[in-house]
Image (tube, rainbow, N blue to C red):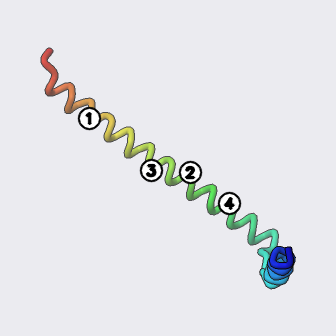
Amino acid sequence: MKDVVQFLAEVKNELGKVVWPKVDEWIGSTIIMIILVFACALYLGGVDFGLSKLAGLIFKSYSLN
């Protein structure tokens, strides 16, 4: 039990040293992350769409019909 209390006291001490971001920094970082997530989603969606079309053309060219 003593170890748990000591651990929690050290955690509280370390959290006191943390420099938390200001609200404007937090909002700016959040907006940048949302934009990056959408950009990655669009890129991966485009790659998926293109590869799907390519695979469809390849399978269609080798079909027995």
Alpha-carbon span between mark 3 and mark 4: 18 Å
- Judged left or right of residue 18, residue 30 is left
Q: Secondary structure at mark 1?
A: helix
Q: Is residue 28 left or right of residue 10?
A: left
Q: CA distance from mark 1 to mark 2?
A: 25 Å
Residue type, mark 1 in image = Ala
Please provide percent x and percent y for residue 36: 56, 58
Nearer to me, 32 or 64: 64
The C terminus: image quadrant: top left
User: Which label's residue is closer to the chain start, 3 or 2?
Assistant: 2
Q: Earlier in the sequence, mark 1 or mark 2?
A: 2
Mark 3 → mark 2, Cα distance in angstroms = 9 Å
Tell me the quarter of the picture where residue 56 sits.
Answer: top left
Q: Secondary structure at mark 3?
A: helix
Tell me the kind of residue under disc 2: Phe
Residue 47 vertical placement versus 17 (above, below): above
Assess whether mark 1 and mark 3 are in contact (beta carbons under 8 angstroms). no
Mark positioned earlier in the residue sequence (2 or 4): 4
Which residue, given by chain and number where applicable, does mark 3 sit on? Answer: 43
Sequence-wise, the earlier of marks 3 and 4 is 4
Numbered circle sitting on residue 38: 2
- In the rendered structure, which amino acid carries the disc numbered 4? Ile
Give whichever of discs 4 and 1 has the lower sequence position. Answer: 4
Residue closest to the eye, 6 or 45 = 6
On residue 31, the disc is 4
Q: Which mark is residue 55?
A: 1
Q: Residue at x 16, y 22 (%)?
A: 63
Say few, some or many: other residues with alpha carbon within 10 Å of mark 3 (under 14 / 14 to 19 / 20 or more): few
Q: Which kind of residue does numbered mark 3 sit on?
A: Tyr
